[in-house]
Amino acid sequence: MSAVTTTDRRPRLDGVVPLTALGPGDTGTISYVDPDLDHSVQHRLRLLGFCEGREIAYVRRAFWAGPIVFRVCDVHMCLRAEQAAMIHVRTGA
Amino acid sequence: MSSALSHHAHAGSADSGGGSPRIALIGSPNGGKTSVFNRLTGLHAKTGNYPGVTVSRSAGVARIGGAEYSIEDLPGTYSLSPISPDERLVAELLDGGVKGIGAPDGLLVVADSTALRRSLLLFAEVVQRHMPTALVLTMSDELTRRGGSIDTEALGRALGVPVVTVVANRGIGIGELRELITGWRDWSVPPVDPPTDTAELAGWVDSVLAAGGYEDPRADARTERIDRVLLHPVLGTVIFFAVMFGFFQAIFTWAAPLQDGVEDFFGWLAGLAAEHIGNPLLSSFVSDGLLGGVGGVLVFVPQIVMMYFILALLDAVGYMSRAAFLMDRLMSRFGLEGRAFVAVLSSFACAIPGVMATRTLPNSRDRIATMLGVPLATCSARLPVYILLVGILIPDGTRVGPFSGRGVAMFLLYLLGGVSALTASAVVKRITGRHDGVLPFYMEMPPYRIPTPRSVGIAMWEPTKAFLRKAGTIILATTIAIWALTTIPLRGDAELAAAGVDPGDEVAVTAYTMEHSAAAAIGKAIEPVFEPLGFDWRIDVALLGSLAAREVSVSTLGQMASALDPEDDSEVAQGLDGWTYTDGPRAGEKVFTPATTVALLLFFAFALQCMSTVAIMRRETGGWRWPSIAFGYMFVLAWVMAFLGRAVTLLIT
Ligand SMILES: Nc1nc2c(ncn2[C@@H]2O[C@H](COP(=O)(O)OP(=O)(O)O)[C@@H](O)[C@H]2O)c(=O)[nH]1
């Protein structure tokens, strides 16, 4: 859990960062899904719309460090921070 | 009616129409698959379980132009590559690898047209199976409203399969879909497979959609506006609690007059029966056994209908996924996920809907864990028992600070129910989860929708019907069995007189009959088990009675305490106050001491004294294993908690 919360601190938004580094309203392009992740889980994340090259927007997070809603492939999909941290995006800046 | 019946008869046999073509619906959750299925099969679906797994199955028959088609509604999924044992089922079904269920002849992919960039990913996996496939696009009304568009024919050409668009919840386009199904033999297998490498899939989808002239829908402005309020950290939380409060208000306060009405009506009917049936055994059977049982079922109906109405409405509008989103963090502390919240919430009305609500959880470990926990929540059948026992335990007028002592005790019991339900689920999840890895949590948040009365009606009717069927038969059967155990054989006047009971004194006769009934014999036989808790055989008989439905134990106690009105709390409490042990080392001592009362309260809080819940668990899990485990662990837990409660109370009083 603590590992996730540290990535929550928002660094400079450029280059490739995990999804958890974004904040409400930020957008990016999915760069890669963590290759160390179990292959079936990588596959599932892609089929949920988190494919390389897709535009993604961080919409909001539930209070008390709950799950995060992203807008990807025209859909609002929510993930817990553990999984969101596995997806890396290139931000526009 | 006759056509509906014949429909039903066909759908009834497990794998009906061995010869009729089998079409399977595949699609992601919330894409409109159930609506399409209901439109095609006309609500005559047969629901059950897939063999050996806790995944519920619904299959039905569509009649199109005199021919019959078996339609199978596969569990909603985002991918055919399984990440849990449950999901393997869908893949196996497509291969015909599930025993007793043949491979489908044609596949109908149901895709939300407002989410095509995502939905076509699943489609790509499906066509790689090289089976006759067609595509149904739902939500076309929403696509248009949000400024998007698609050229169905061009998309069909690009994909190489037939495509139709529908508005599934309003039945628009279903005629075309039915026509499409009749031509399933001509559904093509696309000549060129989509890429198998998932990293390239997005590009494939984009090119296909470009060929189909797809215009992406705008973000739904209405949903954005509503979410800004409903998911606001402060406002959203306040609204969430207001919704929960409204939910409980509705199922407990608004349903109460209806429930009283049902109770009064059956009381009146029973009175009539008792008056007009000459034969005493038959009269007792009709008034206490039959009408008591039917009344016992129907008294729950207003509450259950009210609850399902609210749940169906909240779900159709789109609030349920928001509630799950808000509650996910809390539930994750107990190893569960946000969606399990609905199950826990429902079980505060009744464990049966709670157990049924676990269907929405995507993996079976979560389903089992939730199912084994929710019967501990304080269901409404425990309420009358708690009111009676708390009334005995805490004198009227006791105050804890500004609150009434009884109120505080009730609140603590509710809290205990909630906490123990979640804790039990967490423990079960731990135990069952040693072997497989952690599954990712994901949940789609659909746009807010204005539901049609029909879709809400269907969503509330299906589970209500299941409740009536399952709980109804069980409660009725158990009530009649317990009636028989407590009343047969009837005592003749001579015997009564010999025992010093006035045959004209109905209350005394009931008490005497009960004391010498088969139930009493059972109660006495199991007395040693409960003796350490301070229960005497009469309490054991009441525990037996509670197997029908917990609140029955109140009237059983009342009858044995010779209360004039066994339904009236204060009279029952008065009767119980005078009880002393009839035999054994404690003979002559008072039974309902604070220690025994606390023990009984705790026993009711933890024991799975409800056959209907057991039956519904069996149905949902497809076997006796989990219900037996649930009954066993809860019995042990209840016994130990009651024992500890008694010991502590003895220490402090
Ligand atoms: N506007 C619109 N709503 C739909 C359509 N099809 C289904 N719905 C609604 O979308 C929700 C989800 O549909 P459902 O059939 O339960 O989806 P499933 O989870 O895929 O089985 C329900 O509230 C439906 O009433 C459609 O074509 N247009």
Image (spheres, coloured by chain):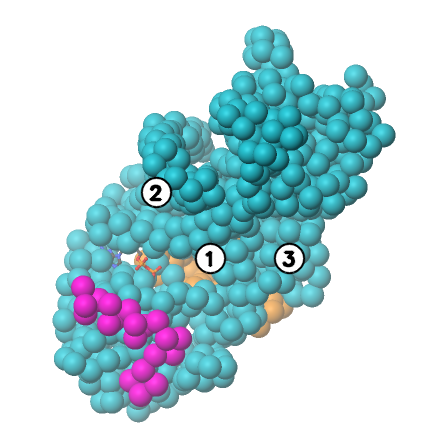
Chain colours: A orange, B cyan
Rendered position, A85 above or below B101:
above
Amino acid type of the residue tagged 3 in the rendering? Ser
Read off the chain for label 3: B
The residue that disc 2 covers is B305
Q: Position of residue B560 (x, y in %)?
A: 60, 30
The residue that disc 1 covers is B359
Rendered position, B64 above or below B576:
below
Structural distance between the alpha carbons of marks 3 and 1: 20 Å
Of mark 1 and mark 2, the one earlier in the sequence is 2
- Report the span colored magenta: B1-20
Structural distance between the alpha carbons of marks 3 and 2: 28 Å
Describe the element under mark 2 as helix, strand or loop. Answer: helix
Marks 3 and 2: same chain?
yes
Rendered position, A24 above or below B11:
above
Read off the chain for label 1: B
Pick whichever, B550 or B77, lies toward us.
Answer: B550
The residue that disc 3 covers is B628
Amino acid type of the residue tagged 1 in the rendering? Arg
Q: Position of residue B111 (x, y in %)?
A: 30, 67
Circles 3 and 2 in contact, beta carbons < 8 Å? no
Q: Residues within 10 Å of mark 1 (few under 14, many from 20)?
A: many
The residue at the point 52 percent across, 35 percent down is B551
Circles 3 and 1 in contact, beta carbons < 8 Å? no
Amino acid type of the residue tagged 2 in the rendering? Val
Quadrant of the displayed image that contains ligand 1: bottom left
Structural distance between the alpha carbons of marks 1 and 2: 19 Å
Residue B313 visible? The answer is yes
Q: Position of residue B584 (x, y in %)?
A: 82, 32
Of mark 3 and mark 1, the one earlier in the sequence is 1
